[in-house]
Image (spheres, helix red, strand yellow):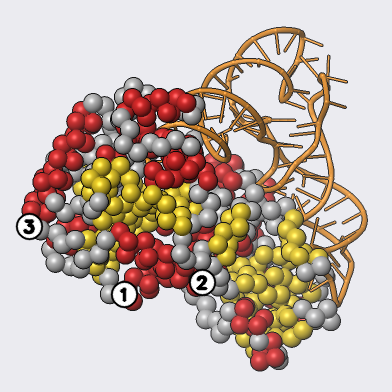
Amino acid sequence: MSEELLDLNEVMKIRRAKLLKLREANIEPFAYAYSRTNMTEEIRSDYAGYEGKTVSLAGRLMSLRPMGKVTFCDLMDASGRIQLYVGQKQIGEQAYEVFKLFDIGDIVGIKGQVFKTHAGEITVSAAEITLLTKNLRPLPIVKQAEKDGEKIVYDAFADTEQRYRQRYIDLNVNPQVREVFIKRSRVISAMREYLDARGYLEVETPILQPIYGGAAARPFTTHHNALDITLYMRIADELYLKRLIAGGFEGVYEISKDFRNEGIDRTHNPEFTMMELYVAYQDYTFMMNLVEEMVCTISEKLNGTLQLTYQGEKIDLTPPWRRLPMFEALQQYSGINLYGKEREELAAAAKQLHIPVEKSWSAGKIIDEIFKEKVEPNLIQPTFICDYPVELSPLAKRHRSDSRLVERFEPFVVGREIGNAFTELNDPIDQRERFETQRAAFEAGDEEAHQLDDDFIRALEVGMPPTAGLGMGVDRLVMLLTDSASIRDVIFFPTMRPEQ
RNA sequence: GAGGGCGUAGCUCAGCUGGUAGAGCAGCGGCCUUUUAAGCCGUCGGUCGUGGGUUCGAUUCCCGCCGCCCUCACCA
């Protein structure tokens, strides 16, 4: 402890000294509770109603402007900020001496009258000011001014590493960060409201799974001691939710974390939030309409509009979204018709398009690569790409009019996939064959090939009705709706390498 | 995993072609009872990410390592 003290910088030493002084003055610097009557925003938005009234507020001191026997402060609570006027005459000489030990970053309670200064600033004049929590580690000082109605921020706390590692500081000093996360919560509640209103049942399924499935990805592996078995963190909820449809539920959804042991970048975090929905007696066309309607409902609720700007790109969410079969999209953007082509022809086409092909790649994989390279970047306005090759989609039902394709779609916006949906494969014999193909791929070295899940097939044998399924990347939807460039800006604590 | 960039005071940043560091804010001491990026005067604060190398001498040049960011690969 004393050694730790030696490491403290000057400011922190002074803060601790103040802490001792406060305790000597019989003031507890870490209070138990404080009863307040109002939030700062209530007063600011209804000055006429509060003028002259006594209110009590609680929050953090974000700015101090001492002027001798009077100090102006900015108090920040969860709703916003308000100015405080702390005068020696009003709170008393002794209390003012104690108040001089307060710092920016301290959390205080204040009771006093609402008034306006000569400059017209809505202000609370303190009759009492109470320390609730002493700040021992100084906050970065971010100053704001308003010029011509525009907010200007000086010395913003901008170091991304520190912002992500010490989000509690980021949230305190960067109000726009708080806004993004409030919006994130609203997106999720709007989604839940939309799904609940249609009678879908929110459920919970295992995160720890003996066989991982539902997506093509490498899992995190863990171990259960008592059972002495390997368990995997789920990479998707799909197979369990479909078991519930086989069990007689007709509409289920789950909003939860999935885990994929893959790289980290601007659109990928090892743990991320997924919404999966399964609806009995429906197909992927139904699901396309649902996605359009749901995303639009959320956008309206969140931003009051279907128009949005993402990183300078204007996006119009107004339905109907373009619906483009995958091979038509490939034809349109690569100029080559790839439908029905054999692997060697596809490899040749890829070469022609300057896309390197590896020998181990299947025909489906080559198509996927060409798609990513040539088509995806062009899908700026909302677009459903539909009808994928069967070998890319081991859990999707074959297309009713083309057995080489499956009834599947992915919604794209700003060149980015935000979901994945299909008419679910419910034929257990076909499902077993698809799993066998995947097993062969796994044994050939494809680490992301789907695992064979006998119990899931058993459920299909019992019978799963015709079903439409959807997965949506919640983080990416939030990024889109909040104009966030990185997934780390919409996840409170993104995965980072541990310090030291 | 590959390539590129960055890492200087609590925060935001300067520091040209090598001579052991500066500013603003914050802090501390003054003055100040309607300020609001408060102001004025004074002052404290840095093993310049880390470990080597070159050099009489390195924050500055070279190499390794650590961390972050960007691009690519894998993927949602």
The chain identifier of the residue carrying mark 3 reads A
* Camera-side residue of A446 and A51: A446
Instruction: Look at label 2 and name its amino acid.
Output: Glu
- Residue indicated by mark 2: A300
**Same chain for the residues at labels 3 and 1, yes or no?**
yes
- Residue indicated by mark 3: A462
Dot 2 or dot 3: first in sequence order is 2
Q: Secondary structure at mark 2?
A: helix
The chain identifier of the residue carrying mark 1 reads A
- Residue indicated by mark 1: A198
Q: From this viewpoint, is residue A128 visible? A: no
Q: CA distance from mark 2 to mark 3?
A: 42 Å
Dot 3 or dot 1: first in sequence order is 1
Residue at image x 59%, y 41%? A7
Residue at image x 42%, y 45%? A328
Tell me the quarter of the picture where residue A393 sits.
top left
* Camera-side residue of B18 and A66: B18
Q: Secondary structure at mark 3?
A: helix
Residue at image x 23%, y 40%? A450
Q: Residues within 10 Å of mark 1 (few under 14, many from 20)?
A: few
Mark on residue A492? none
**Same chain for the residues at labels 1 and 2, yes or no?**
yes
The chain identifier of the residue carrying mark 2 reads A
Left or right: where does residue A189 sit relative to residue A79?
A: left
Task: Determine whether A94 is above or below A272 in the image.
Answer: below
Left or right: where does residue A230 sit relative to residue B48?
A: left
Task: Determine whether A35 is above or below A387 in the image.
Answer: below
Instruction: Look at label 1 and name its amino acid.
Output: Arg
Q: From this viewpoint, is residue A416 visible? A: yes
